[in-house]
Image (cartoon, grey):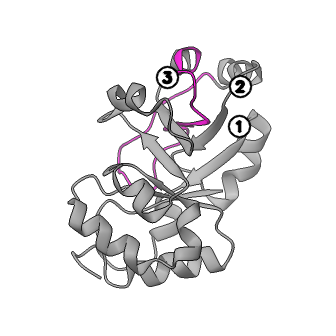
């Protein structure tokens, strides 16, 4: 299971992240699209060092070695940078929003976040209708990377995700839903 951070900052965020890791969370994608490098450094410095190896950065990749994070995620905004990180030894992930895109994933990518599988929990109106049989067949193809389901993943849907053949699943809305509205700072 992979958790994806809320895009904005909120009070007590580092404390909550530390608690999730202490409870066994294997991986957190730190996705803060509007954050400055200083804001990212501040948040990362409040997350216990022992958990840094479970964090994937979506931006400010220069912080990867400073904080010894797990790896880098290349999204739609920074996919063109993949070639600059060919020699990067950490984990690398990217996104796909079409079944056909799974046939064009660059070499060296360890896993792909495939979304939106179901109507999003965190983004109202963000959904897609899939031909589930076509998707199931695409997921059965041999690949050099894993495919992780994202979008509308709730506890009730995990068995459906597994039955489709995904290697793992990621959650954003389901993880943070009960938290207060986002505010800047810690």
Question: In which quarter of the view is residue 7 placed?
Answer: bottom left
Q: CA distance from mark 3 to mark 2?
A: 12 Å
Q: Residues within 10 Å of mark 1 (few under 14, many from 20)?
A: some
Badge number at residue 88: none
Is residue 11 toward the left or the right of residue 141 in the image?
A: left
Q: Are marks 3 and 1 in contact (CB under 8 Å)?
A: no
Is residue 33 toward the left or the right of residue 22 in the image?
A: left
Ranked by sequence position, the earlier of labels 3 and 1 is: 3
Q: Secondary structure at mark 3?
A: loop
Residue behind mark 2: 139
Q: CA distance from mark 3 to mark 1?
A: 15 Å
Q: Are marks 1 and 2 in contact (CB under 8 Å)?
A: yes
Point 69% across, 72% down: residue? 24
Point 46% across, 69% down: residue? 176
Q: Residues within 10 Å of mark 2 (few under 14, many from 20)?
A: some
Q: CA distance from mark 1 to mark 2?
A: 7 Å
Badge number at residue 166: 1
Question: In which quarter of the view is residue 77 placed?
Answer: top left
* Residue 152 locus on image (x, y percent): 53, 49
Residue 29 appearing in the image:
yes
Whether 11 is drawn above or below 50: the answer is below
Point out the stretch of residues depicted in magenta: 102-131
* Residue 113 locus on image (x, y percent): 54, 39
Q: Secondary structure at mark 2?
A: helix
* Residue 169 locus on image (x, y percent): 64, 48
> Camera-side residue: 84 or 185?
84
Point 38% across, 37% down: residue? 75
Task: Specify the quadrant that holds the C terminus.
Answer: bottom left
């Amino acid at each position: 299971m992979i958790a994806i951070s809320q895009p904005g900052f909120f009070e007590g965020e580092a404390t909550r992240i530390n608690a999730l890791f202490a409870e066994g969370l294997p991986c957190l994608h730190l996705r803060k699209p509007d954050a400055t490098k200083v804001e990212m450094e501040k948040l990362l410095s409040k997350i216990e060092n022992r958990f840094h190896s479970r964090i994937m950065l979506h931006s400010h990749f220069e912080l990867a070695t400073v904080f010894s994070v797990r790896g880098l995620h290349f999204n739609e905004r920074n996919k063109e940078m993949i070639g600059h990180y060919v020699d990067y030894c950490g984990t690398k992930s990217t996104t796909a929003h079409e079944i056909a895109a799974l046939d064009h994933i660059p070499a060296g990518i360890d896993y792909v976040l495939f979304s939106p599988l179901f109507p999003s929990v965190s983004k109202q109106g963000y959904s897609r209708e899939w031909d589930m049989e076509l998707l199931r067949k695409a997921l059965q193809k041999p690949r050099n990377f894993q495919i992780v389901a994202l979008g509308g993943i709730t506890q009730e849907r995990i068995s459906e995700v597994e039955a489709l053949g995904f290697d793992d699943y990621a959650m954003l809305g389901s993880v943070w839903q009960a938290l207060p509205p986002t505010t800047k700072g810690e």
